[in-house]
Image (tube, helix red, strand yellow):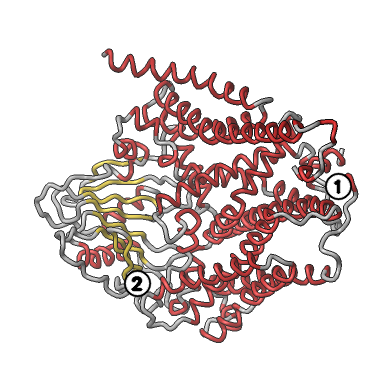
Amino acid sequence: MKEGFRQSMSWLHTYSGLLVGWVLFMVFAAGTASYFKDEISFWMRPELHLADLHAPPQAEVAERAFAALQQRGAQGQRWFVTLPTEREPGVRASWMRAAVPRGQPEAAPEPGVSRRGRFDSALLDATTGRPLQASRDTRGGEFFYRLHFDLHYMPPLWARWIIGFCAMFMLVAIVSGVVTHRRIFADFFTFRPGKGQRSWLDAHNAVAVLALPYHLMITYTGLVTLMLMYMPWGPQLTYKGDTSAFLAEVFPANGPRDPKPSGISVPMVPVGPLVTQATSRWGGAPVGRITVNNPNDAAATIVLSRQEGHDMSSTQPAMTFSGATGRLISEVGEEPGAATATRSVLYGLHIGRFGDPLLRALFFLSGLAGCVMVATGLLLWAVKERNKYSKAAARGLGAGWALRLVDGLNVGTIAGLPIAMAAFFWGNRLLPLQLHERAQAEIHLFFAAWALAAIAALARPTRRMWLAQLGIAAFLFGAIPLLNALTTDTHLGATLPAGLWRVAGFDLVCLAMGAAFAYSAWWLARKDGRPMVRKQPAHATGLLADVKGAR
Amino acid sequence: MADTSRPEPHRHGRKGPILRRSSRLRRRLAVASRVLAAIGGGYALSALAATVMAIHLPTSRVEAAVAGMLASFVIYTGAVVWVFAARSAWRAWLGLLAPGVLLGGLLLLHLHAGSAT
């Protein structure tokens, strides 16, 4: 590293991107899908497609949800209710289960209720307040959302450290990448197709620069979402280790983290009038979430917070009422401090829930550009390395293990992950409805398909393998509208005339993905028969030489 | 590195390959040292900066803590870039150590003042 600044940054860019590139590809792909997690979940519950989605007034819906919670979680310490939105017509209710004495087995959750740790949750029908049992058991889009920071088959805490580590690498890769490409905006307008390594570099530059603000934003804000876990040291010291006191100040709306019950049982006031009061206070804006601390206790509090979507912040104004008397205890307004407001907006930017469908679609496209950026970066390394080895091969040396490994991981991730995602959707339609732990079975299918693709790719990382896997991905995605037509009544032929865009949109996006994979397979097949390694002009080997050559 | 298979010219005698190997080892150690400085040292420096900001920023307690945390990832990135841009691994470490000592001093000052009262 005695070379210049840009050379060392180029080295840093290459290795910080390469070493964790495959994890980053997965995070980008699953995270991009998460922008439409409600729509994915909806598509994966075809039983609800034609249900009457007209939600009654919020006050009524809240009353019904509370009645359902009284039946199930009356003894629990906390309830959460998320009222219906345009994107999610069901009511999401979750409650903390009462502690079971040691040694006693816990009752299994009733149908339609899913369990995570000490919380049970269910999607309730907005008009009846009953769990939406009629729909099949699936994690839906929530799976991709969790996957992109919690991974799977491992404790979430480990997973979040791994993802945070990789996100830091990404941040370094982006910054060093910008430094490396001094002619960054000129490069953006340069695309030289059909020129091997140079074309890959151009493609990598184009997608990276096109959505550069997005890439930088999404990586940094991703770290911010979990910053208390990654960087707890400041509040550790200034709050003397009392994390809940810190959190109570960052999220004043939630009240104290662990509110103490009084032990005196008092019935709660009806929630409907509170919802009406809050809505009129916020100039008609709907209530998003209702939190109940210590339900049915004299010290019960009911916290109503405004629905997201009125500004970019993830923290919304909230009103806290006494559960026993209905008195307004406190109100958290829209004027938080500069740093906490910044954090809320950064968080809000990351999850992108504030946007209308068009803006979310732009985020989705930027996320796809992120996937392509990571993929072309990984491919670029392999192409460069192969060129190096083509010279070594001329002297009778074989290709290295590193190249073979990277090739295998590239096929198994860039083509294998889409195969797995499509397999997840196929499983949703084809697995028997009464299957035990059906939602888990869909997830196992996702990982089985991915493992199969990855093992095959690592065993034979060849051009033929690329072709095969891209072809499979093209078929699996492209045929999803057909699969939907064969297994449900809400296929494109029905949803397009009826204007049921939530369902039709999913089918159409899958069709587009299928077409994109088919095009890349066709592009690759067209080049088949030509030698794998093309002779490069001497000045075009290596990123550094390329940067110099472009001057 | 691909050149190791090439026979050494005779005039270097027996010492040639050994010297070569030791310099290669040295280079690898230098890279390993930088990686350690970037990941471990960079984290330590950014955590220290976040803590000092949480203590000393002239605003409310929660604001200072959050500002420190938000800034820490930027500082971390800057530290990693510095480590790999520095002319040698030694300078890389030195560049982390200097602000580290300064921030550590500010932290100690606070801890000392806290225990005195």
Q: Is residue A237 left or right of residue B86?
A: left
Front residue of this view, candidates A392 and A386:
A392
Both marks 1 and 2 on one chain: yes
Residue A531 image-quadrant placement: bottom right
Residue A457: x %, y % from top left: 64, 67
Residue at the limit of the structure toward the right, as seen here:
A537
Front residue of this view, candidates B9 and A503:
B9
Residue A90 image-quadrant placement: bottom left
Residue that label 2 marks: A125
Residue B99: x %, y % from top left: 53, 20
**Residue drawn at x 46%, y 73% as measured from the top left:** A442
Label disc, if present, on residue A540 of the rendered structure: 1
Tell me which numbered mark, 1 or 2, is placed earlier along the sequence.
2
Instruction: Report in which chain the residue with disc 1 lies.
Output: A
Question: Which numbered mark, 1 or 2, is in the foreground of this view?
Answer: 1
Label disc, if present, on residue B41 of the rendered structure: none
**Residue drawn at x 79%, y 39% as measured from the top left:** A183
Instruction: Report in which chain the residue with disc 2 lies.
Output: A
- The quadrant of the image that shows the C terminus of chain A is top right
Front residue of this view, candidates A265 and A446:
A446
Q: In this view, does A524 lie to the left or right of A268?
A: right
Residue A35: x %, y % from top left: 53, 58
Amino acid carrying label 1: it is Ala
Front residue of this view, candidates A438 and B15:
B15
Q: For label 2, count other residues whose C-alpha is less than 10 Å away and answer few (under 14), some (14-19) or many (20+).
A: many
Q: What distance separates the C-alpha of mark 1 from that of mark 2?
A: 62 Å
